[in-house]
Image (tube, rainbow, N blue to C red):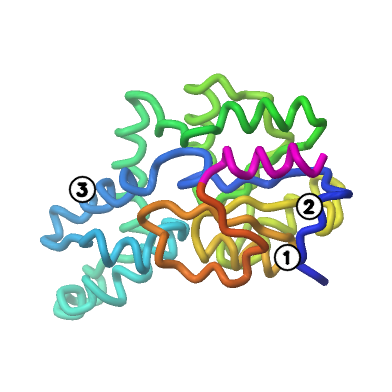
Amino acid sequence: MSNAWNPAPLQALLFDHDGTLVDSETGHWQQWNQALAELGVSIDEADYSAHYAGLPTVNNAQRLLDTLLCESESRKPPEQRLTVQDLVARKQAATRAYLQGGAFPLMPGVREMLQFCQQAGLRMAIVTGARQFVVEATLRFHGLEGVFETVVSADDVQHSKPHPACYLLALQRMGLQASQALAVEDTQFGLAAAHGAGVACVAIPTPLSAHHDFAKAVRVMESLGQLQRELAQKS
């Protein structure tokens, strides 16, 4: 299955959430450090950028147990050691507390891009490694409820990004072939998920993901505005 971008039969855009639709990765980094403060460890920005940005919470929790928390947890009796679920709960509590006051801000050009898709008759979905409650906060706070045909979150699949299951489920729900859709991602992990499902992917890196490997992307662009302009030219 080819990942070459052929926009002629394009029917749908499948958007990542964190870092693509909302400016949230710095917020997630800060929330992880809030969750870890009581444990006496923290993730520096470079480490977060290299190993955590763009991955589901459960993946990040497992990495923390394997790295930053490995030594301290190994000294505890087995029954007192933290689990992946414990860390996920800590992070989700920090995120829920943040979202009580609103939602992550939209990335530049999001509203214009969504309006363009609506006018062009392009179907839209969100395919994310975030939890459903995070996406719902975005849609509710920014008045975007009803804009997206479907949302596939980490709650919907057993294996989230970089596994392709989330994209395969989105295609199934929308009744689309992979060649009829274009993914928009900001990290190599999201790109890997789209590529694994045979969906061509445009990468729009953020400062936290600028160093990621985007070799499998059909294009690397500077902004959603650039993608909008190129789609308009090809329509």
Query: Of the residues shown, which amino acid type is indicated by label 1?
Result: Ala
Residue at 35% across, 71% down: 63
Specify which label sits upstream in the sequence, 3 or 1.
3
Residue at 39% across, 42% down: 24
**CA separation, marks 2 and 3?**
36 Å
Q: Which quadrant would the N terminus be assigned to in this image?
A: bottom right
Give the foreground label among 3 and 1: 1
Badge 1 marks a residue whose secondary structure is loop
Q: Position of residue 49 (x, y in %)?
A: 34, 62
Which mark, residue 197?
1
Q: Position of residue 36 (x, y in %)?
A: 20, 56
Give the foreground label among 2 and 3: 2
The foreground one among 172 and 229 is 229
- Write down the residue under mark 2: 171
**CA separation, marks 2 and 1?**
9 Å
Q: Which quadrant would the C terminus be assigned to in this image?
A: top right
**CA separation, marks 3 and 1?**
35 Å
Query: Of the residues shown, which amino acid type is indicated by label 3?
Result: Gln
Specify which label sits upstream in the sequence, 2 or 3.
3
- Write down the residue under mark 3: 34
